[in-house]
Image (cartoon, rainbow, N blue to C red):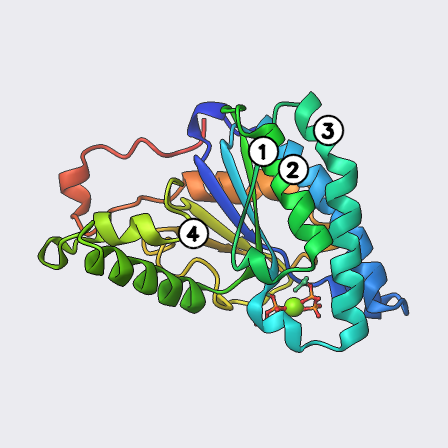
Amino acid sequence: MPVPLENAPHHVAIIMDGNGRWAKQRGLPRIEGHRRGVETVRTVTFAARDLGVRMLTLYAFSIENWKRPQDEVGALMGLLEYYLRKELETFVRDRVRFRAIGRTEELPTGVQQLLRTTTEETRHFSDYTLVLALNYGARTEVVDAARAYAAAVAAGKEKLNDGSWATFSRYLYTADMPDPDLVIRTSGETRMSNFLLMQAAYAEFYFTPVQWPDFTKADLAAAIADFNRRERRFGLTSEQLGPVKTVAK
Ligand code: IPE
Ligand code: IPE
Ligand code: MG
């Protein structure tokens, strides 16, 4: 079903899950699932833009993922480096702004360097942004933000009594990003796994059994169409919102 561009959610965030199971079902090593997952990242990055999305955040590596077997973690870091090295050219050519959120300072130095370069060389693009959540955990983000906020209060840059969400949220990794409108999780799991817990306070959720390596533009379009059938009330009543204007044309 074609999705009218003007109805697209501004910011879509995806918990990319199911690479391991995809591989296992085919008798392949887990890393093969991750390799195919990288191909899906490429496809979905441009599919989202075609569908009218302005910002796409992909959960690529959680803080908890360090606890996986060392060879899998090593392979994931290797893939990340390979991906960033290859994509910079594409981002520049196709005007994709890139950024990363998470404790990136704990990633391998080679990856950190690539993140810096990619962020820097794409920072002047404004139409479409790809955000990778790397070494990301929502609870750690809140701890980091609280620490930075406390330091700002101690330094006299913030007043404790003014502490509103608008002020505090400027200390999150996502400081200058809009909240996600739609959060998608693949692979049939229906949990958040420590992803954007604060920012997704009023997001719509969409869960699909499709494993990430199999996720296509059509699957994304289906998620967006579903999103467009919903009424977001933000605590108000339906009557307060007026006539529903969400049904896909
Ligand atoms: C998602 O796929 C990728 C990462 C978390 C890095 P998984 O590796 O979690 O795949 P499953 O859940 O084991 O199938
Ligand atoms: C969430 O997937 C993290 C990423 C997609 C990067 P996981 O596969 O790590 O989550 P759990 O362990 O099933 O909750
Ligand atoms: Mg998983």
Residue drawn at x 71%, y 38% is 43
Residue 135's place in the image compared with 70, above or below, is above
Q: Amino acid at mark 1?
A: Glu
Q: Amino acid at mark 4?
A: Tyr
**What residue does disc 2 label?**
117
Tags 1 and 2 touching, CB below 8 Å: yes
For marks 1 and 4 on the same chain, the one whose residue lies earlier in the sequence: 1
Q: Which mark is residue 120?
A: 1
For marks 3 and 2 on the same chain, the one whose residue lies earlier in the sequence: 3
- Residue 78 x, y percent position in the rendering: 79, 57
How many numbered discs? 4
Q: Quadrant of the N terminus?
A: top right
Ligand 1 shows up in the quarter that is bottom right
Q: Nearer the viewer, mark 3 or mark 2?
A: 2
Residue drawn at x 22%, y 32% is 243
Camera-nearest residue between 79 and 112: 112
